Amino acid sequence: MPSKTSTDSQFMARLGEIRKASETEGPAWLLPKKEAAWNAAVSKGFPTRKDDEWRYTDLSPLFSLPVVASRADGGPEGRKSGDKFLAPEDIAVVIANGRLPEELPVIPDEAKGLTLKKFSAVSEEEFRNWLAPDFSQPTDLFSGLNTALNYDGLWIHVPAQLQVKPVIHLCHVASEATAVNVFCPRVIVTAEPRAEARILMTFSSASGAAASFTNALTDITLGFGAKISLAVIQDESHENFYIHSARVTQHKDSSFDSFILTTGSRLSRNNLAVTLLGERAETLLKGLSLLQGDRRADHLTAVNHIAANGTSNQLYKGILNGQSRVVFNGKIYVHPDAQQTNAYQLNKNLLMGDHCRVNTKPQLEIFADDVKCSHGATVGQMDPNEVFYLQSRGVPQKTAVAMLAKGFVDEMFPQARDSVLERFLLTVNPLLGAVAH
Amino acid sequence: MLEIKDLTISMNGVEILKGINLSVKQGEVHAIMGPNGSGKSTLAKIIAGHPDYTATRGEILFNINGKMVNILGLAPEDRAREGVFLAFQYPVEIPGVSNAIFLRAAFNEICRYHGAAEMDPLDFDAFLREKMARLSMDEKYVNRPVNVDFSGGEKKRNEILQMAILNPRLAVLDETDSGLDVDSMRVVADGVNRLKSGNNAFIVITHYQRLLNYIVPDVVHILKDGRIVRTAGRELALEVENKGYDWLKQG
Ligand SMILES: Nc1ncnc2c1ncn2[C@@H]1O[C@H](COP(=O)(O)OP(=O)(O)O)[C@@H](O)[C@H]1O
Ligand SMILES: [Mg+2]
């Protein structure tokens, strides 16, 4: 059993043991990538707080995690524990303890043409045509570890013009009772011109599950005029460590939106990088952190405007109580060619306790001159005038506070109720009561 | 019904209300006029229980079940449930909370407090729409967040709507007519007159005597520099409209 003061190199060594179990797993095109990714990771080492992107989040508790290799079948019982988020009309893939199921779901007629494929079933040619760019992107340490330690990934391909109506639900469940596992789920989504799909990724822990470390990597490419929406719910146990890097590439006229809901954990790091490569691309990024106790959430966004006439909007909110802490580091980069870019960013935080903390840091690098850009951040207690206004109508103080907290959240959901929103509310509503008091 | 005795408030060592005495009986309408900064809103807000203000002296007695109770010790929500209502000079915006949900929550809180049955959403919706129609409020305000993106006039109407729904025993209207055109002012006045009965009372704070042509006061008070410097019948309103406040010496 590693001691509390286990170092990053000892942790890397444990990951090396785990890797041995999977280094020869996977298709031929993937093995050299895994090998290279591992070697790069080892030589790079873990970032420290001297690293700008990790200034507010200390990784050292992660290094004490006594991780071991996960069971090859993922633990069949785990596939049932994601029930809370499963809906019968979804195209659902339950990823139990980091492992894809034996069989991927049958594609219903209404989504005919949609491809769901494991990396292990992807041909050399498909790899070259669709997946290769994502494997040649520059990676940070955790993305590299994902590639090195992933058992098998999932490729989702939406062909031109197809509008996928059912939600594609990737339901991640951690259910191991004693073994501490590291999960490295990898998803690549490719959407051809004018394709449309909604993807929901849920991450939850079964009750009584041991701590785990989820290190997920998601790549999404939107072709001309494609529309993809990504909803992420991280609602894991307090003991978990979670790092999810999503990288999005948008071509002309495409439109991407994301909504990340996190309840925090020991570590919850959400990296989201969006590159607007084609003109007139639009992107809308939303995030909501509902944190209590000593949970943490850390959001790093990077919106890169490379082409002209793009629009990006970021809205991240947090409600915190106890000693919880949220970090928001939002970067906007506007390339000299990206004229007439509109890029907005807003981070609003509601502090319900005296000991919670927010670190918010906008980072704007603008190299085009004809650009509309704005950013703002608020951190504060609930406005006593708002509370009084409700009280003056007969609403008791506690209820008033809860109503205002709910209003703060509901503002983020202007759309009509749909099945994804229902899933959000499943997490939001019970937690809101807890966080608001 | 309301008996304010020697009410004194200091903020940062400065007295802003300096011993207010005011007695309002059931069925009466009192007007309070006075220059800006004289303490009118402070008086209105301490009646409703705003946490910014604590009395350094005096009391506010309010008839609760036949007994005169000092409500300074009551939470704002309890004052509201006992029938105190304040139409705010500056209504507060509540993002994300729809007007209908807010109003129903408030209405049902008060029902529950008095042991009455709550109204279900459908019945409440009908009740709300009827009240809104009377105030010529567009239906789009039903589901909008409270006061968010409301014009100044719509915010004031929304205050009167809340008053009409909660049916208070004592309503304090703080400059509800300021910034309203004549038509809107008439709508507001109608709202008050419709509610007015022998069982309730109104304190109408205003700068303009014109509102008092529609809401006829029984008594007019002039508040100046934290003191009530004159109390008389409705003719006093006309007098200050013509002569201003300067001729009234400090109490
Ligand atoms: N919360 C407060 N803190 C400090 N001073 C206040 C506060 N509220 C009111 N005042 C002061 O008290 C005086 C009366 O204000 P107010 O009651 O708003 O006057 P009116 O409504 O008659 O214009 C003003 O000088 C104002 O600056
Ligand atoms: Mg005032």
Image (tube, rainbow, N blue to C red):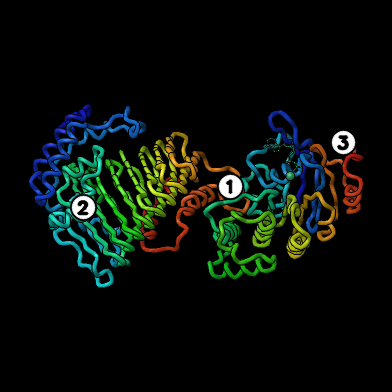
Q: Amino acid at mark 2?
A: Leu
Looking at the picture, tell me which residue is in the foreground, B66 or A307: A307
At which x and y percent is residue B62? 72, 49
Q: Secondary structure at mark 1?
A: helix
Judge by depth and name the residue closer to the eye, A314 or A158. Answer: A158
> Which quadrant of the structure image shows residue B122?
bottom right
Mark 3, mark 2: which one is toward the viewer?
2
Residue type (three-letter) at the residue carrying disc 1:
Glu
**Residue A422 visible in the displayed image:** yes
Q: Chain of mark 3?
A: B
Which residue extends farthest bottom? A109
Query: Is residue A314 rendered to the left or right of residue A41?
Result: right
Whole-Å distance between the Cαs marked 1 and 2? 51 Å
Looking at the picture, which amino acid does disc 3 mark?
Gln
Q: Dot 2: what SS?
A: helix
Q: Residues within 10 Å of mark 3 (few under 14, many from 20)?
A: some
Write down the chain letter for disc 1: A
- Horizontally, residue B105 falls left or right of residue B50, namely left
**In this image, A277 relative to A435: left or right?**
left
Q: Are marks 1 and 2 in contact (CB under 8 Å)?
A: no
Residue B89 image offset from top left, x and y in percent:
70, 49
Image coords of residue A417 (percent x, y): 42, 63
Asked if A356 appears above or below A185 in the picture, the reply is: above
**Residue where numbered disc 3 is placed:** B250
- Kindly identify which residue carries mark 2: A131
**Residue A211 visible in rendering:** no
The answer to which of A87 and A191 lies nearer the viewer is A191
